[in-house]
Image (cartoon, helix red, strand yellow):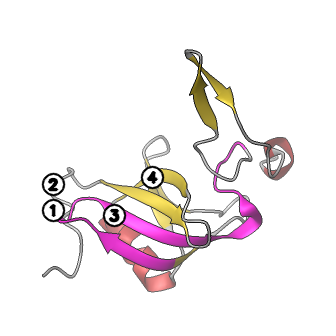
Amino acid sequence: MTDKPDFAKGNGLLPVIVQDAASRRVLMLAYMNEEAWAKTVETGLAHYWSRSRKKIWLKGETSGHVQRVRDMYVDCDADTLLIVVEQAGGAACHEGYASCFFRRLQDGAFVVTEQRVFDPKEVYKA
């Protein structure tokens, strides 16, 4: 039995599958390091490691669309996480969609198959 994921396996970063508690739909894939894991466990709000910004971020810190953690699972190798969340604001994607997986392969090209929940230009004013 383990009390935390094995962060050594992923050179300090582990993939996190994020699933909506109500619909069970996959909302996004993110990464956590040990500090993001600890903040998530401590606060009950999802924190991730931003590979592009090279820092920890609270999901929804800008948009207000935070993820309240309902359940957390670790896989058999303790190197991948599944987090079941209550998604505030109805959208996990920074492009304004409910899920980051809003494009579907059709006839050899990816096409948008959903409507935006919010306008990212309005939410992420610089």
Q: Earlier in the sequence, mark 4 or mark 3?
A: 4
- What is the CA distance from the residue labelled 3 to the residue labelled 1? 10 Å
Residue at image position (80%, 52%) is 117
**Regarding mark 4 in the picture, which secondary structure is present there?**
strand
Magenta residues, start to end: 70-95
Which is in the foreground here, disc 3 or disc 2? Answer: 3
In the picture of the structure, the residue carrying the numbered disc 4 is: 30
**Regarding mark 2 in the picture, which secondary structure is present there?**
loop
Give the amino acid at mark 4: Ala
The reply to whether callout 3 and callout 2 are in contact (CB within 8 Å) is no
In the picture of the structure, the residue carrying the numbered disc 3 is: 81
The reply to whether callout 1 and callout 2 are in contact (CB within 8 Å) is yes
Where residue 86 sits in the image (x, y, percent)? Answer: 61, 73
Residue 126 makes an appearance in the image: no
- Of residues 66 and 87, which is closer to you in this image? 87
In the picture of the structure, the residue carrying the numbered disc 1 is: 77
Give the amino acid at mark 1: Asp
- What is the CA distance from the residue labelled 3 to the residue labelled 2? 13 Å
Q: Earlier in the sequence, mark 3 or mark 2?
A: 2
Residue 123 makes an appearance in the image: yes
Seen in the picture, residue 112 relative to 81 is either above or below; the reply is above
Q: Is residue 121 left or right of residue 74?
A: right
* Label 1 crowd bin: few (<14), some (14–19), many (20+), radius 10 Å: few
Where residue 64 sits in the image (x, y, percent)? Answer: 73, 66
Quadrant location of the N terminus in the rendered image: bottom left
- What is the CA distance from the residue labelled 2 to the residue labelled 4? 16 Å
Quadrant location of the C terminus in the rendered image: top right
Where residue 7 sits in the image (x, y, percent)? Answer: 21, 61
In the picture of the structure, the residue carrying the numbered disc 2 is: 9
**Regarding mark 3 in the picture, which secondary structure is present there?**
strand
* Label 2 crowd bin: few (<14), some (14–19), many (20+), radius 10 Å: few
